[in-house]
Amino acid sequence: MTPIALCSDDYAQNPGIDAGILQLLACGRLSAVSCFSTAPNWMRTAAPAIREYKGQADIGLHFNLTEGFSQTRMPSLHAVILRSLLKGMNAEHLQQELERQLDAFEEGYGQAPDFIDGHQHVHQLPGVRQIVLQVIKRRYAGKQIWVRNTVPANPAWRGKPQILKYLGGQKLAAGLHVSGIKTNHGFAGVYGFDRTDYGNCFKDWLAAAQPGMLIMCHPATEVYPDDEIARQRVVEYNFFRSQEYLDLLAAARLKLARLSSIA
């Protein structure tokens, strides 16, 4: 069976997301989790809970430049993208912020992350991806840290998948290859967070599967305020708890695996 990875983003953002992810991990329905080490509850509750799944799933850092958790005013994604395209990112500040978030991750989780990605894919933006590569090569020399790239698993996919590719996904993938840093082979899970028939989306993504493909997801057990995609998170959670999800994997002859273990 072909090994692919399924990564749930946004762990530690709110209790509904955390509950959904932990329940899916408990029944073996995820193979990776991306964590906000900047979240207020990371140290107190989220990190201790996710430590129970060391070795079962890849646990990584969700590098954050835009989410303030209803407590801190943060720039919008559009503002960050514009600044990056205009070469206005402060390299020293970015490095310090990434190091700070990695420090917090390691303090809470007890070891280095298995991987690094970015909330709203900020890690791939111009001026940001260079810092990510530099920090990984210096801080984790000799360690197998993988990094998400957003190059679509199916080149024919249009819309948001192509936007992500050209907003830095393709250039990050090339930089990772040159640097010898492991990454996924094809990316999926991109849609408008507006589909009640999420299973049909997932079936389309599986049709493009290859060894080492990465699918992102955003499940939660319940709706929380101040979350634009809260209702769709519950749709995703219900799908991943369903027999339909398992049947789709089996029909496509696919199995979940940690990307860190896929050659």
Image (tube, grey):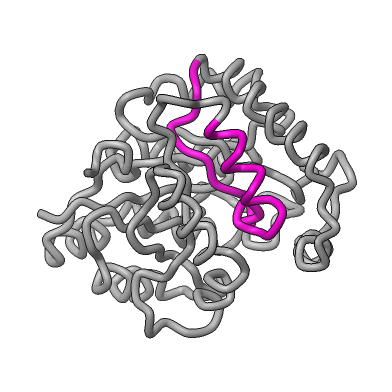
Q: Residue at x 66, y 22 (%)?
A: 104
Query: Could you tell me if residue 158 is visible in this image?
Result: yes
Q: x, y percentage for residue 177? A: 41, 52
Instruction: Look at the picture and state if 246 lies above or below 40.
Output: below
Residue at 81% x, 61% y: name it. Answer: 87
* Residue 116 vs residue 33, the one in the foreground: 116
Asked if 191 appears above or below 231 in the picture, the reply is below
Horizontal and vertical percent position of residue 150: 48, 62
The residue drawn where x is 44% and y is 53% is: 237
Question: Does residue 87 appear to the left or right of 33 in the view shown?
Answer: right
The stretch in magenta equals 111-137
Residues 188 and 234: in front is 188
Q: Position of residue 78 (x, y in %)?
A: 79, 67
Q: Is residue 104 magenta?
A: no
Seen at 24% across and 73% down, the residue is 207
Give above or below for 54 relative to 232.
Answer: above
Q: State the quadrant of the C terminus.
A: top left
Image coordinates for residue 158, horizontal then vertical, percent: 48, 84
**83 lies above or below 118:** below
**Residue 129 inside the magenta-drawn segment:** yes
Q: Farthest residue in the right direction?
A: 73
Q: Nearer the viewer, residue 130 or 249?
A: 130
Please name whichever residue, 165 or 63, is drawn nearer the observer in this view of the structure: 165
Query: Total number of numbered labels?
Result: 0
Does residue 16 appear anywhere in the picture? no
Q: Name the image quarter holding the N terminus.
A: bottom left
